[in-house]
Image (cartoon, rainbow, N blue to C red):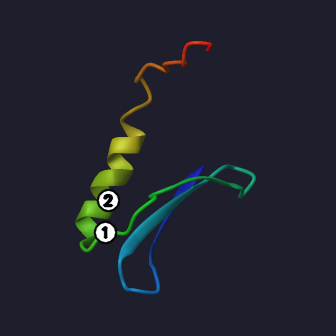
Amino acid sequence: MFYYLYRDAVHQWRWTLYAANNRKIANSGEGYHNKADALSAINLVKGSALAPVREAAAA
């Protein structure tokens, strides 16, 4: 698994997370003006491994 950090068409920083089979599994969802902010977002995703998963109640 790896993160790919890049600049988009409007020169904002974005990231995409790829699985071991090179399939995209997540992305930043927004552009960042500063590279440091994009890297901080990556670190938030990396650090959220212990976050609980909440399921919606059946309607």
What percent of the width, then of the height, locates residue 30? 40, 63
Q: Amino acid at mark 1?
A: Tyr
What percent of the width, then of the height, locates residue 40? 28, 54
Q: Which residue is mark 2?
A: 39
Q: Amino acid at mark 2?
A: Leu
Looking at the rendered structure, the secondary structure element under dot 1 is loop
Mark 1 Cα shell of 10 Å, populated few (<14), some (14-19), many (≥20): some
Identity of the residue drawn at 71% across and 58% down: 22
Contact check, label 1 and label 2, Cβ < 8 Å: no
Identity of the residue drawn at 54% across and 18% down: 55
Identity of the residue drawn at 44% across and 58% down: 28
What percent of the width, then of the height, locates residue 17? 55, 55
- Quarter of the picture containing the C terminus is top right
List the single residue furthest toward the front: 59
Q: Is residue 57 above or below residue 18?
A: above
Identity of the residue drawn at 40% across and 24% down: 51
Mark 2 Cα shell of 10 Å, populated few (<14), some (14-19), many (≥20): some
Measure the alpha-carbon separation of dots 1 and 2.
10 Å
Q: Which residue is mark 1?
A: 32
- Classify residue 54 as left or right of residue 38: right
- Classify residue 23 as left or right of residue 57: right
- Classify residue 23 as left or right of residue 33: right
Earlier residue among tags 1 and 2 = 1
- Classify residue 58 as left or right of residue 36: right
Q: Nearer the viewer, mark 1 or mark 2?
A: 1
Mark carried by residue 46 = none
